[in-house]
Amino acid sequence: MNTADFQSSSETAPSPSGRGGGESVYHHILQEYFGYSSFRGIQQEIIESIGSGRDTLGLMPTGGGKSITFQVPALAAEGLCLVISPLIALMKDQVEHLRHQGIRAAAVYTGMTRDEVITALENCIFGNYKFLYVSPERLGSELFRAKLSRMHVSFVTVDEAHCISQWGYDFRPSYTQIADIRRMLPDTPVLALTATATPEVVEDIQRQLLFRSPNVLRMSFERKNLVYSVQHITSTKEQEVEQLLRFLPGSAIIYTRSRLATRELASWLMSQGITATHYHAALTNLEKNERAKAWREGRIRVMVATNAFGMGIDKPDVRLVIHTDVPDSPEAYFQEAGRAGRDGQTAHAVLLYDSRSAGILRRRIDDTFPPEDYVAQVYEDACCFLQMAMGDGRGVTREFDLEEFCRRFRHFPVRAYNALGLLSRAGFIEWTDAEENHSRVMMSVGRDSLYGIQLPPLADRVLHHLLRTCTGIFSEYATIHEDEIAHALGVTELAVSEQLIELSRRHILQFIPRKFIPYLTFTQRRVERDEIVLPPRVYADRKSELSKRVQTMIEYLETDECRSRFFLRYFGEETKSDCGLCDNCTHKGVLPECDEAEVRRLILDFVDRHHPTSLLQIQLPEVPATLLGRVLHQMLEEEEIVLADETAS
């Protein structure tokens, strides 16, 4: 690629850099496709760097707008932008978002049929797309590499670039294959992006990606408006969360580690009069969209979620992020806490912990890295479960029901899940967690052939809806959501599915129903159990790195240092001044400390002075409303005080 690749097809268009007067073509694209009038932070620096053909590493904290830095220059360039990302759900979301904007994009990931993959890759060769998203596991495919060699690639984007470093918190061995792609495309620059990288990881990313010269553009990780606090749980998690929400107004996210906990906590908050909903990966697409929209629009105040909620969040006025469980890495916590206060106004990030938190964190190390003998046993059991003979299996993909597998072979789900992940990282299998592979359709007949076809009324409505809303449906498979179609047409989801099956039976379209199930691919032939050896970079080194990160989080709980400085130092950024905002800087917690016995004394004194109880909160502002209400309720139940008719004269 050279700079000419980035010239607009219009002879009167300004140059990409904007030098010579007027706004750059990048600004025009930003305004036209994304609706923004100006770039933020270091977005423009990154765009101009990759636009000039330089290998570029962009370090941008959560909310910095990473996608803009590759989508804008890709739209300005001739050819295709190859985007490598480990997050299948995010790939799908970004492809759908681009298509809704009229930008041709495709994704290739596990669960697609061979025909779908070939169709997508052939369209890339013919120049029908501006973006091709792929998971790193696809890079080793002979089919993919053969097709890639015939594509005109403007530049390669590596998202979540820390995954290429064995010192990164989420190392993926498949990322190391990107170096082979670079050798295939020697003149094609690379843009690497990440929100979390220590100095050691920054150096390793550039080395692993074969940067032709060092080139790092970074934003400060300092969030001057974000107040970090650690709150020791003295009652129950539910009561602590409610007390924080009463004390700190505004939109909030509460992160928990389990799907069940999201539902239970959201339900409990609703019972306390606080509007809340829950979110996790197993919800349907319609449920996710409706809940996220209600929360973004302020109709629901609190989103209780697992870490599945976070990708693509675009709500600037989140005032509070609470973690009810301690994350096992500073990187994960920093990203999730950083979703508060993107509008620049004061926001709070509160981490709850109790006396068991450190022990639970340490146990996660053994759960994440179970003994190697156990990992080998899981491999052998998985082969038996899928009836894979010794020496067979290379390239074979099978549906893999983890719940049934654990039941049949008596495995603890968390450990079995992590063992499969280790086997995947070691290259014995390719394992994808339960992933909703949405339904897909492609027309089997040309547009002209549709005229004159007689269809039942509902089938006709479904077909017309598809033709109106699905881009490129005559040349490629389009992702659809039956629940959204049903909602738009005012019918049931089952009725839509039945019509799609009928259209498929009549050979009008090809319909691939959605599945919500994991896949397991054997990347090599089945081997004997004693041949399962996990390389140090997959097991021993990674376990050691996780132990260090867990210890860092325990130190974060216990430190009396400025919490902002604590994080900045971890990410290699030194500052001489404290934030002046966190609980350690102000020497107090988020909530005022009040003893229940003292609150009882204050209430009794207040009542003795014959003041109406309705004025309690006004007269005792130092007492949190939740604590005041709880103690008052207890005193009434114990008949220590009795409510009189305060409206009587």
Image (cartoon, rainbow, N blue to C red):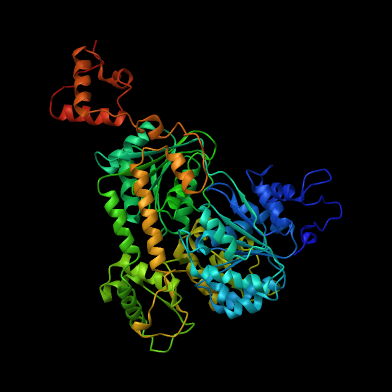
Residue shown at 44% from the left, 74% from the top: 426
| Residue 3 screen position, x and y as percent | 78, 59
Residue shown at 64% from the left, 53% from the top: 69
Q: Is residue 357 left or right of residue 297?
A: left
| Residue 224 screen position, x and y as percent | 51, 36
Q: Is residue 255 left or right of residue 310?
A: left
Instruction: Answer whether residue 455 is visible to the viewer in this image.
Output: no
- Name which quarter of the figure residue 92 lies in: bottom right
Instruction: Answer whether residue 137 is visible to the viewer in this image.
Output: yes
| Residue 589 screen position, x and y as percent | 34, 33
From the viewer's perspective, is residue 78 above or below residue 198?
Answer: below
Q: Is residue 607 left or right of residue 546?
A: left
Residue shown at 33% from the left, 37% from the top: 273
Looking at the picture, tell me which residue is in the foreground, 309 or 22: 22
Q: Quadrant of the N terminus?
A: bottom right
Q: Is residue 479 left or right of residue 448?
A: left
From the viewer's perspective, is residue 510 above or below residue 584?
Answer: below
Looking at the picture, tell me which residue is in the foreground, 206 or 484: 206
> Looking at this rendering, what residue extends furthest in the top direction?
649
Looking at the picture, tell me which residue is in the foreground, 583 or 21: 583
**How many marks overall?**
0
Q: Quadrant of the C terminus?
A: top left
| Residue 318 screen position, x and y as percent | 48, 40
- Name which quarter of the figure residue 450 lies in: bottom right
From the viewer's perspective, is residue 166 above or below residue 557?
Answer: below
